[in-house]
Amino acid sequence: MAISVLAGFGSSAMSLVAGIWILDLTGSPSLAGLAGLCVYAPTLAGPWLGGVVDRVPRRLLLIGTNLVLAGSLLILVVVADPGLIYFVSFVYGLSYVLLDAGESAVLPSALSRDELGDVNGWRASAQEGMKLISPAAGAGLYAWHGGPSVALLSAVLPLIGAVLYGMLRLTRTEKPEKSGKWPGFGVVAGVARTTVGVAAVAIGMSAFATAPQYAVVVDDLVLPSTFLGVLLSAQGAGSIVAGLVAGRMIAWRGVVFTAAAGAVLFTASLLVKCLPWWPALVVGAVVGGIGLPWTLIAAVTAVQTHTPDHLLGRVSATANTVMFGPIAVLNPLGSAAVHLGARPALALAATCCLAAAASAARTRRPVLQQ
């Protein structure tokens, strides 16, 4: 939990400041936007990076990744150059993939299966909670003392994280995989494939709905663009609640039910945002903030509990690629679809999410079934 808090604060603060820093150095908004691309690009190599997680001691990989990340950030404390900021952003992206896969793989060695759902939910709440405060804190520190101060703070946090990883008590011995053959996603039980599929649809549709939501706020309801910040905070509040109760939901009805319920809630949030009333947007943001994390937490927990231990790294990384990869395609498609109308685009996204939930409901099985 402490690692999640530290990582969530540092990454959220630096991701915003990287773009602002490049903008100040170059004066180019387009160059500033490329920092986000550097962070996202390594996700596409998730299956191969996940293979690294399975071939080395996972705890050492987690510690080493944090140390490399800290070292790259310290470079920016000394030299402020756009190229180096891109490099650090890329290292951040690599660390996201390795740390996500490594944590997903190592947690089953530190916790019982009954605890995984709760801890995954708590970690999600911690990370979402940091998103509410860290961007503003990072921007404030940048305005006060400049980019090097943010880089220094962001470098200290993974150093602490490395120490905390060393304190984890593992109940099972890790056995690194020596085979170089990729076994395919088929080694994962159907229940895990189902939940990952639901999460992929929901997360993809959230990217598709980004531009339509902007259009509803600014064009249809004629609200100031700053109202989007209110919606982001409302969504974050819903995500914190979602993480706190996700474990109980999984224990009660299983991962497939939780994923399907999350998709249904996200469907409702998209439809509510079609109403011509600004309070409906806030309600929809809160409901969506609950539903979307449920699909993700259920998918992560299902992969952890239905994947052979020696394959957890690559399967977790592949699952992340499956869930987040569609963003690259669906986000620009949503930006194009909004020209046909914001509400029809939101309705289309809602239909896709509801179809995914209905498909999952037909294959629902208990989370602990072997």
Image (cartoon, rainbow, N blue to C red):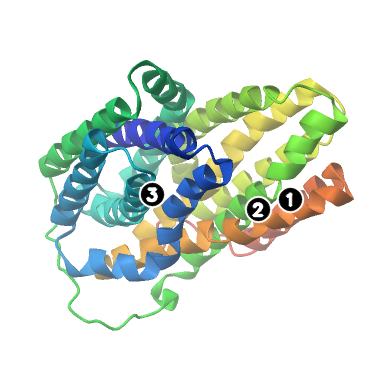
> Where in the figure is residue 94, as x and y percent of width and height?
33, 56
**310 over 351 or under it: above or below:** below
**CB under 8 Å between discs 1 and 3:** no
- Residue indicated by mark 3: 86
Of tags 1 and 3, the one toward the viewer is 3
- Residue indicated by mark 2: 331
Q: Residues within 10 Å of mark 2 (few under 14, many from 20)?
A: some
* Rendered-image quadrant of the N terminus: top left
Q: Which of the two residues, 316 or 29, is positioned nearer the viewer here?
A: 29
Image quadrant of residue 269? top right
Image quadrant of residue 125? top left
> Where in the figure is residue 83, as x and y percent of width and height?
36, 49
Between the residue at mark 1 and the residue at mark 3, the CA separation in whole angstroms equals 25 Å
Q: Amino acid at mark 3?
A: Tyr
**214 over 346 or under it: above or below:** above
Between the residue at mark 3 and the residue at mark 2, the CA separation in whole angstroms equals 22 Å
Helix, strand or loop under label 1: helix
